[in-house]
Image: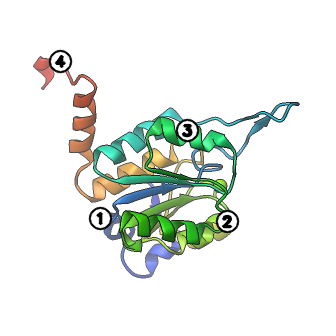
Amino acid sequence: MPREARGGRRGPSAAARARKVRVLVMDVDGVLTDGRMALSERGDELKLFNTRDGVAVALARRAGFRTAIVTGETTTIAKARGEKLGVDKVVLGARRKGDAIEALLAEFALGPEAAVFVGDDLLDIPGLARVGLAVAVADAAPEVKAVAHLVTRAAGGGGAIREVVEFVLRAQGVWKATVGAYVRDHGGLPARRR
Ligand SMILES: [Mg+2]
């Protein structure tokens, strides 16, 4: 489970904030990945993603959440990952993430309290300042943790999104039902174990 951070001591608890969440917004580098990228001589880029975060996005969607990726990078890797995960929106080249998240929320017709945003570095701070639940990964920059309501135990690329989704769905009392529905969608348990 993630831990409450300094931002959480002002106003509602992280759990109270989580109860209002309807949209999961994620940074890519340092959140869905560990922040490293491999570059070939030809300039090809490779990133490593965590499959458990992929399942977390599926769980969030199963629970009826909108999902989005907002990255400052312009590489098509983020777009490909987003498409594979079935996220509603991938915003590339977002150098002003606060504005990008405001535009997203307007598009989804949701208020700032309905958004959780997970970030790791300085570019994420304006975005974190505009959402109801601001989350920093364990190895985020100290300045990012300082504005977060919640800090994950996992580092970026290490299942941080899985932790956030579990925290939010548990706060809303739908974690077990959502996991059950997800398992049923994929074949369910043998009859004797139902
Ligand atoms: Mg980042």
What residue appears at the point 66 percent right and 70 percent down from the top-left corner? 143
- Label 3: state its secondary structure: helix
Q: Residues within 10 Å of mark 4 (few under 14, many from 20)?
A: few
Q: Along the horizontal axis of the image, is 154 left or right of 163? A: right
Residue 27, placed above or below residue 183: below
Q: Which is in the foreground here, disc 3 or disc 1?
A: 3
Residue sticking out furthest to the bottom: 10
Q: Say if residue 94 shows up in the picture.
A: yes
Q: Which residue is mark 3?
A: 81
Residue 38, position as x, y percentages in the image: 77, 35
Indicate which disc, 4 or 3, sits on the residue closer to the N terminus: 3
Mark 3 to mark 2 CA distance (whole Å): 21 Å
Q: Which residue is mark 4?
A: 190
Q: Nearer the viewer, residue 91 or 115?
A: 91
The kind of residue tagged 2 is: Leu
Q: Which is in the foreground here, disc 3 or disc 2?
A: 3
